[in-house]
Amino acid sequence: MAEKPTRLALYLNLIRWDRPAGSYLLLWPSLSAQWIAGGGFPGWHLLIVFTLGTFLMRSAGCAVNDVADRDFDKHVKRTAQRPVTSGAVSTKEALLLGAVLALVAFMLVLTTNAATIAWSVAALAVSIFYPYTKRFFSMPQAVLGVAFSFGIPMAFAAVRGEVPALAWWLLIGNLFWVLAYDTEYAMVDRDDDLKIGIQTSAITLGRYDVVGVMLFYAAFIVIWAALGMQLALRWPFFTGLAAAALVALWHYTLIRERSREGCFRAFRLNHWLGFCVFIGTVLAYAIA
């Protein structure tokens, strides 16, 4: 007889503690934006605040998302055994855990400045709103793209005390990357999602899903490359973007057959694409 999991084990499962890839997807663009905003290393304080805050908020988001999607998740093969969906963790417990994690993250933000605090509230609102867009919006991944890119304006606010147009262009570019990898994610569950009637970009794009993903990747790389040229960044930045483009081409080989395994693997390993861009950004300022 299998041993019953402890409450701690259930809570760690709820916040995807053993699957940090989602946190990296949030982290790399935020840190890249910090380096760009500061023209180099932003300082240990902001680096620690944004790194810890990213992991905390992603964990809080998982708890809230599972509550919002609990009636849908039980019909999806991949999510049917999640703690909230299976009843192992109550909705009240999940929301309380999410609130505590979000509060700790907010306490970290309070050590920055007023502009960052204000933008963090907006970021939280978008994150809470996102799970419900699957019910009525044909491309909810675009809303997720805004939520997952909000670390960029927050980074500029923290470093500069303001959010210039550059930050919003970086956000737009990053939004296309989120559209790419979350469409791959949606391709995994498309059959189940069609049965239960929720909206995803994979369903909306239909047979053009693979083309759409590759165009999203291309838009991200082109926009960030154009901004890098405008900022006169050195060659490591563009080398990082070239490496990211190679990762995107590799992902094409994983998703072109639309298998669940291939699409999920492409999504799960997407953080390496963001890591390439981040390392390129760091090195570009290091040799400037």
Image: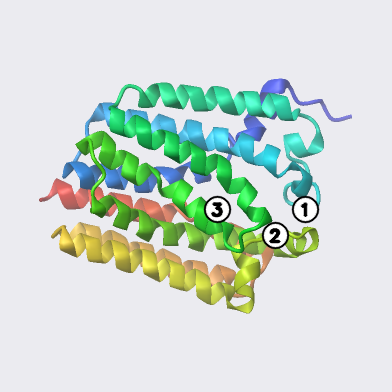
Q: Amino acid at mark 2?
A: Asp
Report crowding for label 1: few under 14, some 14 to 19, many 20 or more residues within 10 A (C-alpha): few
Query: Label 2, label 1: how many angstroms apart (C-alpha)?
Result: 8 Å
244 on left or right of 36: right
Q: Determine if residue 239 is in view.
A: yes
Residue displayed at 79% across by 58% down: 196
Note whether 73 is above or below 96 in the view shown.
below
- Label 2 sits on a secondary structure element that is loop
> Quick one: quadrant of the N terminus?
top right
Q: Nearer the viewer, residue 176 or 139?
A: 139
What percent of the width, then of the height, locates residue 87? 81, 33
Residue at image mark 1: 77
**Foreground label between 3 and 2:** 2
The kind of secondary structure element at disc 1 is loop
The three-letter code of the residue at mark 3 reads Arg
For image coordinates 18% across by 41% down, the residue present is 38
Per the image, the residue denoted by label 2 is 189
Q: Earlier in the sequence, mark 2 or mark 1?
A: 1
Q: Nearer the viewer, mark 3 or mark 1?
A: 1
Query: In the rendered image, which residue does mark 3 sit on?
Result: 268
Query: Which of the 4 image quarters holds residue 172?
Result: bottom left
Q: Secondary structure at mark 3?
A: helix
Q: CA distance from mark 3 to mark 1?
A: 17 Å
If you read the primary sequence from the N terminus, does the residue marked by circle 3 or circle 1 appear first? 1
Q: Mark 2 and mark 1 in contact? Answer it, CB < 8 Å.
A: yes
**Foreground pick, 251 / 176:** 176
Residue type for callout 1: Lys
Taking the spot 73% from the left edge, 47% from the top edge, the residue there is 79
Q: Tell me where residue 102 appears, x and y as whole percent.
A: 51, 28
Answer whether labels 3 and 2 touch (C-beta < 8 Å): no
